[in-house]
Image (spheres, grey):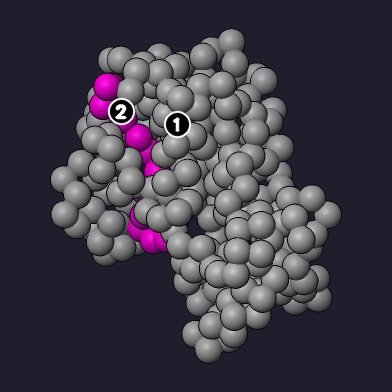
């Protein structure tokens, strides 16, 4: 195989959480670049929607929380894509509740999906990524940056802050293997995540409208805007970007 530093090289890419939102947008952006993409998620119908009209996208139904998932995902990439150049750890789940309202299952689901899953999948992918001198992209959240907080979002934010720390640490640990590790911190992006987390559509719409007032750019972002940046961070032009988290939030985190 070629290396990830060669822009003419058609790469093998894995995107977890690829059935909706940012994962779907990133998978399609990689495919439009000419890369072969394995999209991973728990829902076959949504994965198939991601792959519609994109012959370079291959769906794989898998839950990153399952102990067998890392082996299954990496094996599928090696078998069907011929290797692994880029791993995008995007799968995440959120459950909005304050400390008095959280329960064991929701905490465990968020920690296992948002944090444990990326750790074990990246570990399993190391040999293939070293061979390719590849790139890991961890998708965090602008809401977990700095000293800001959002009531009811503590567990999700904590997992994303931890993922940012992993980005910095892995960049140091894996540099001698030729593997870059970068993060991206999306801000308010209209992915429908609030509805999937249990909010009504009316409540979610109200939340977006209220938060928009605080965004210097004056609007909510689109998944494609984040997907485009994910691809950019893996390009050879970004080869000196390592261990950092790029914020894409319309300026919200600096207000």
The magenta segment is 8-24
Residue, x 25% and y 61% (percent of image)?
Answer: 49
List x then y, in percent, for residue 174.
59, 18
Q: Is residue 162 visible?
A: yes
List x then y, in percent, for residue 39.
33, 47
* Dot 1 and dot 2 residues touching (CB under 8 Å): yes
Q: Residue furthest front?
A: 217
Q: Is residue 123 above or below residue 203?
A: above
Task: Give the quadrant of residue 234.
Answer: top left
- The secondary element bearing badge 2 is classed as loop
Q: What mark, if any, has residue 11 been given in the picture? A: 2
Q: Residues within 10 Å of mark 2 (few under 14, many from 20)?
A: many
Residue 198 highlighted magenta (yes or no): no
Task: Give the quadrant of residue 45.
Answer: bottom left
Residue matched to label 1: 234
Q: Residues within 10 Å of mark 1 (few under 14, many from 20)?
A: many
Quarter in which the C terminus is drawn: bottom right
Residue 14 highlighted magenta (yes or no): yes
């Amino acid at each position: 195989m070629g290396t990830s530093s060669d822009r003419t090289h058609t790469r093998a890419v894995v995107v977890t959480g690829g059935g909706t939102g940012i994962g779907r947008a990133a998978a399609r952006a990689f495919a439009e670049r000419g890369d072969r993409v394995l999209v991973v998620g728990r829902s076959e119908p949504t994965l198939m929607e991601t792959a519609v009209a994109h012959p370079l996208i291959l769906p794989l139904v898998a839950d990153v929380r399952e102990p067998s998932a890392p082996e299954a995902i990496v094996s599928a990439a090696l078998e069907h894509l011929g290797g692994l150049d880029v791993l995008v750890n995007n799968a995440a789940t959120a459950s909005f509740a304050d400390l008095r309202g959280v329960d064991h299952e929701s905490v465990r689901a968020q920690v296992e999906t948002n944090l444990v899953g990326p750790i074990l999948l990246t570990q399993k992918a190391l040999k293939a990524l070293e061979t390719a001198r590849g790139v890991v992209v961890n998708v965090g959240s602008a809401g977990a940056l700095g000293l800001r907080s959002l009531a009811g979002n503590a567990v999700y934010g904590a997992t994303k802050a931890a993922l940012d720390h992993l980005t910095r640490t892995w960049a140091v640990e894996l540099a001698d293997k030729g593997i870059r590790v970068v993060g991206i911190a999306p801000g308010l992006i209209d992915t429908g995540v609030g509805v999937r987390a249990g909010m009504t559509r009316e409540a979610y719409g109200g939340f977006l409208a209220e938060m928009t007032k605080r965004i210097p750019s004056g609007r909510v972002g689109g998944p494609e805007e984040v997907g485009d940046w994910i691809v950019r961070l893996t390009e050879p032009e970004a080869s000196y970007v390592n261990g950092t988290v790029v914020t894409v939030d319309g300026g919200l985190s600096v207000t």
